[in-house]
Amino acid sequence: MNKKVLIIEDNDDIRESTAEVLDLAGYQTYTARNGKTGVDLATSHLPDVILCDIMMPELDGYGVLYLLGKNPKTASIPFIFITAKTERADMRKGMEMGADDYLTKPFDDLELFKAIESRFKKKQQSGSFGGSAASLQPVLDELRRKGKVKTLAAKQVIYVEGDEPTHLYYLLQGQVKTYKRFKDGRELSSTLYHDGDFFGFESICNGELYADNSATLISSEIIQIQKSDFMEYLLNHQSVSKLFISLLSGSIRDKGKQMLQLAYSSVRKRVADALLQVADKFGNGDDSCTIKISRDDLAALVGTASETVSRMLADFKEEKLIEKTGNAINILSKEKLWNVKQ
Amino acid sequence: MNKKVLIIEDNDDIRESTAEVLDLAGYQTYTARNGKTGVDLATSHLPDVILCDIMMPELDGYGVLYLLGKNPKTASIPFIFITAKTERADMRKGMEMGADDYLTKPFDDLELFKAIESRFKKKQQSGSFGGSAASLQPVLDELRRKGKVKTLAAKQVIYVEGDEPTHLYYLLQGQVKTYKRFKDGRELSSTLYHDGDFFGFESICNGELYADNSATLISSEIIQIQKSDFMEYLLNHQSVSKLFISLLSGSIRDKGKQMLQLAYSSVRKRVADALLQVADKFGNGDDSCTIKISRDDLAALVGTASETVSRMLADFKEEKLIEKTGNAINILSKEKLWNVKQ
DNA sequence: CCTCAAAAGTGATCTAAGTCATTTTTTTTG
DNA sequence: CAAAAAAAATGACTTAGATCACTTTTGAGG
């Protein structure tokens, strides 16, 4: 979509010619002949950049800037003064009030374009949505670069319930589970992680102690990222906020699903579901695939006793839904298994 | 804490005198005599504002700005050029590269302070943490003001699974539950909301369709806030991001707890827990309190059949943990009930 | 205050799944 | 490669809690 530029200028010639130039350059322009309508237009159309004259009847440029600055919705729109006043004092006053740039008339078209684009770019950089994917990558790279790579053997505990969260983790390669432990020692896994997943951020995000445990399933390589680094990026980069907000809410959705199953689904269905979950996370994308997971881990995922899992697997084998080679499980058809859990 | 100002300037006199003035004014200053050390200092100390000369040996001001702009950590630090170059072209070049202001030497102290403070204020406005509590309130007020107040009778459905989320909700007064529906119609409530709670944001946050339903328990007043308004505030105001990130992660923690209970706790314990949950949300703070909730709603909260809930309540009554007046439940001692669920 | 539908409670029955003890299979290791 | 240890499977038994059918209580509305 074209960038929207609002031009607030009382001089008809300048207003029209500026608008024309910007129109030709592919911007969508809105014009106002005085400060008051300018503020209205800004509030209703939320332009990407505002160009504003200082000396105007009704409401001058300083007033416009003040009013727009008060409204959270318009406060962050880049604001560029354009004016004939070349005097230093006026320019300083404009900047002190929070303007983002200052163009003195007469300015040429190139100056105008560059001023608009540089403010636009500057805003993109430190905020606003839109090109998030593009801006997210370097930030994540930076985060990971700051972290320390660690190699862990299978079944190593990464953090435990009640610990003070000091790190965010990124799984370079391997398999990790997060789980809770019931009083009597039984476990319930909530999430499985594989290459490229972040984990351990929930507790950091809500500022309390870890509410779950995490451990490797197989030997894995993880990056430990300092909590302080993470927090800084989380709040200062919208792309990062956006990512983690969506990770958090995705996790809520998954937990909700799992809860419903736990409450009302038979173990048979839950085992089928758990197998598919494991296959999705750790298997290849094919309809049939082989997964390797201990019965205990599977039981923790289902929320049942490991004996029960064994029995179910025996049933599934009987029904030709799976096969077993050693302790590995061969899912013959994800689709058929999917029907079981319905 | 004092604001940190980094001064990058090769001229010893100007550098020292500027630093001195700022020191006296209560700023914490760092100085660099060339661009290279300036970049190092900026990266290591992360100042709140950077003042930078343009013409310098080793690395000029433009180069410094470029390098700092590339690093996500320093990109959003306000950058003010200070220079003797009064020529318009140089000033334009600086601004086009993304500088935030431009002071031409000689400048007086007041100009300097104002320039620093206005950039600092500007940044505060559209980001950075710190005074979050203070800045959160007006934004939330604004959000609520934008919304539409609605009054709903008891048992009214607010949104259902599969709907496109179009609103965020704020419960002015009343009681609301969110719940999921199992294939056969059984329900599982995940959360109860009371006055002052936001709800319905999870699905908005992850950009998918609603994954749960919500309905009033008693007649309630809610504010409907447009999704677009919410999204804008969510990403553009750190205080709002912070709030919702913590709401989301809090919700994850609660769901995690509830899941563990569902998996391994007896119905007896889960009923006790549900009663306490309801008492906490809707009752007064006393050790004994009266709550009014239908057995169906309670069953949905526990994740069991309503008959089972009735039986449990009968048991609790027998054990003098609760009493019943009509259909209301009188919790005689939260503490004793709490022991049950342990 | 009475009527009546909805909500709550109870009784009897049944089964899915937990538990514990034991056997079989797989993996590890000296 | 054999022995030991760990993991998985199976068998026998038990029970929590779901289900269905029915009775009792409650509170809304005339």
Image (tube, coloured by chain):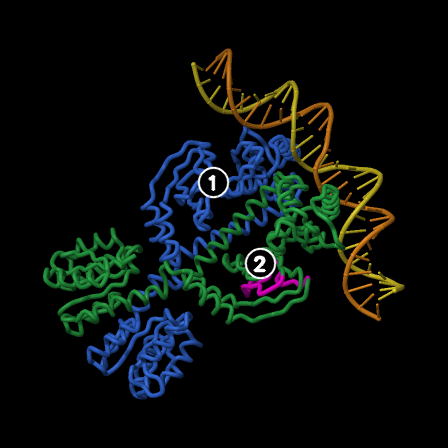
Chain colours: A blue, B green, C yellow, D orange
Which numbered tag is attached to residue A22? Answer: none
Chain identity of mark 2: B
For label 1, count other residues whose C-alpha is less than 10 Å away and answer few (under 14), some (14-19) or many (20+).
few
Residue A223 image point, x, y percent: 37, 42
Chain identity of mark 1: A
Q: Amino acid at mark 1?
A: Gly
> Residue at point 40% right, 45% down?
A168
Q: Magenta segment, which residues?
A: B155-174
Residue A225 image point, x, y percent: 36, 45
Is residue B171 shown in magenta?
Answer: yes
Which numbered tag is attached to residue B210? Answer: 2
Q: Quadrant of the N terminus of chain A?
A: bottom left
Q: Residues at marks 2 and 1, common chain?
A: no
Residue labelled with disc 1:
A162
| Residue nearest the viewer, comparing A330 with A85 | A85
Q: In the picture provided, is A63 more to the left or to the right than B187?
A: left
